[in-house]
Image: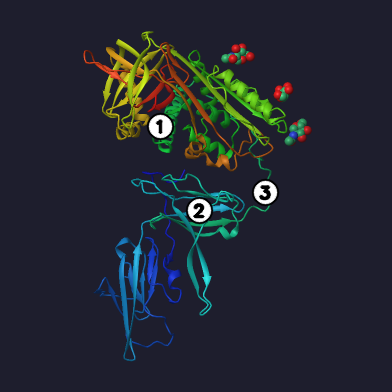
Amino acid sequence: MGARCGSKVSKMHPPVVFCLFLLLNLELSICTQLTVIPGSALELPCISLPTDFTGSPATWKFNGEIMGNLTSQPSGSISVKKNGLILSISPVSAAHSGKYECSVKEHNMEISSTYDIKVIAANAFTVKITEGQSGHLPCYFPCSSQVTANALWFKETTQLVLEDDSEEIFLEDIPMSENDRRVERLYPLDKDQTIILRDAVPTDAGMYYCKSAEGEILSIVQTIIEDAPTDAPHPCSGFDVPWETCLDENSRTNGPMLQESMTEFSMALYTFLRQSKPSGNLLVSPISIAGALSHLLLGARGDTRKAVERAIRVAHDFHCVHLEMRKLRNKMAGSLEMASQIFYSPQMNLSDSFTTQSIQFYEAEPARLLETSENNTEMINNWVANKTNNKITNLVDSVSPNTQLMVLNAVSFNGLWKVKFGQKSRKGVFTKLNGDLVNVPILYHQKYTLVMTHNDLLRAQVARFALSGENSLYILLPYSRTAADLQRVEQRMTDTAVKQMIAQMATMSPQHVEVTLPRIKLDVQSDINILIKKLGLSSLFEDANLCGLNPEERLVLDDARHKAFLALTEQGVEAGAVTSMSFSRSFPSFSALRPFILLLWSDQANVPLFIGRVTEP
Ligand SMILES: *[C@@H]1O[C@H](CO)[C@@H](O)[C@H](O)[C@H]1NC(C)=O
Ligand SMILES: *[C@@H]1O[C@H](CO)[C@@H](O)[C@H](O)[C@H]1NC(C)=O
Ligand SMILES: *[C@@H]1O[C@H](CO)[C@@H](O)[C@H](O)[C@H]1NC(C)=O
């Protein structure tokens, strides 16, 4: 949601004028330095007007030049009023930036005034929030900028000037503190500096300004607080219906549609992840996150349902999504085992239709949480360990007594190399991003059979390692070990580019290659709370409509976790792990003894299973 780099934003043009330096010049009756936004209307008085003023017409200069042809009939956007004593500009555009001087003669005396007008190109938004609810006030740094400090937010406030009863406008700092989370930055130190305003009250209405630390105005948000409905209906009324039946169960397009969605979702997820962690190892299983979100979708209604559908990139009202998830899971079974579960509070009732459909589509019969936090921690961790083949044993340290609901999804992958590596233990030297060398155990083969290519679109050397159960491990090796080259590959890894790469390599013949891969073991926990917000699901943290699951109350998400494990061994790839490669002079070589990106792909189901980056083997 909201404006992203490269996408359109809708703008409004409020008639806003404000004096950035007003506080310093409170003794002046008018402000002389004005910052205005394009599209607004501006009226510049030459002098304070006594009603009986009879002097000669005023002369206006713009950047030192006398402005001719000023009439009270607007020609273009500039006109005058009251015998030239008021210069009116409407609508304001960038060309109107500059210095305006006006002078007028009266009783042998000349009075003049000067204005500095700065027209800024900030984004302007209008946001409507219902009283008591929360809303987002958008603000974005330009796409090209490096974010080193958070933007600052101000609210326009008026203050009565006692002398003449007029109102002065000034900007008041909006405090954001850890203790009072009513106003909070959603993504600290991100290009997206949007804030959330919770529990809106009528006095929150007004103009908000987001400025960079250097003082540049990034956005102006007109906030309107609407009255809360006086007679709030039951939170789930109208929403407690079961998920719709899939009518065209055998449609041939459903499967490919879900594959497209999963690939698009996976690449979007990796983009958010790499942006939030620009260096260091990464590993995430998009299929597992999508599995948890689609299970949640089964119980989501209203706006929450729409948001989850958008997040996992499925069309709204693709009623067959759950059936297709089941088909996808069954297709991958054998190499990727996926399990889902829902634990819920003993004080809560789940709707019968949700329980039935959860069993039908996710083979998950929701289970009640136990009495104590210790019991729940043990139960959850045991479930996770069991479903990941003991690869992940410690997902949670504790389960809060406030927990109402836990949605779990676990995947366990096992693929054997089609071409085995030698059993002899060897060592190689991995060059890190910063040039440091580390000794690592390696997998080595002098004449490995694989498909290898230089992909110019992705700017990487790519090798495809065939695995049992119709899976492949793709390793994308940037042209050098530098961070810039790694980031370039990552930026180019769109879903389209990746699908093209996979389709192209499917047509190529394998060749004999000397291969060296680091024998790595990745164990990575990612902060997916931010990722979930980035996917457009921040509303889950505020008010999740899961009325299809629990028809009695609304819930909020308070923590999300993701741990992934991936190991490359002599035998193959285990559950989300990576391998590396080496190069030779005698035959073409592929040596991944420097930072690389990996993509574990289900060829059977044609969807990504794991995506990761290795910079520290
Ligand atoms: C759950 O259902 C039981 C039996 O129908 C009912 O007595 C109880 O009040 C319900 N709990 C809640 C929280 O509504
Ligand atoms: C809860 O934990 C306690 C202490 O570890 C144990 O004795 C008890 O059997 C557990 N209860 C359940 C239902 O697992
Ligand atoms: C998981 O639990 C099932 C049923 O209790 C058991 O048969 C299986 O061996 C367990 N798997 C692991 C990896 O512990």
Q: Look at the image and name its color scheme.
A: rainbow
Proximity of marks 1 and 2: CB atoms separated by less than 8 Å: no
Marks 2/3: CA distance?
Answer: 22 Å
Residue corresponding to mark 3: 232
Instruction: Classify the position of the C terminus by image quarter.
Output: top left
Q: Quadrant of residue 77?
A: bottom left
Q: Is the residue indicated by label 3 positioned so its CB lies within 8 Å of ligand 1?
A: no
Q: Quadrant of residue 421?
A: top left
Image position of 66 with respect to 585: above or below: below
Q: Along the polypeptide, which appears first: circle 3 or circle 1?
A: 3
Q: Along the polypeptide, which appears first: circle 2 or circle 3?
A: 2
Of the pair 424 and 318, the residue shown nearer to us:
424
Q: Quadrant of residue 245?
A: top right
**Residue 291 left/right relative to 431:** right
Amino acid identity at mark 1: Gly
Marks 3/1: CA distance?
Answer: 49 Å
Amino acid identity at mark 3: Ala
Q: Residue at x 62, y 36 (%)?
A: 546
Of the pair 116 and 321, the residue shown nearer to us:
116
Q: Position of residue 260 (x, y in %)?
A: 42, 27
Residue corresponding to mark 1: 280
On residue 127, which mark appears?
A: 2
Proximity of marks 2 and 3: CB atoms separated by less than 8 Å: no
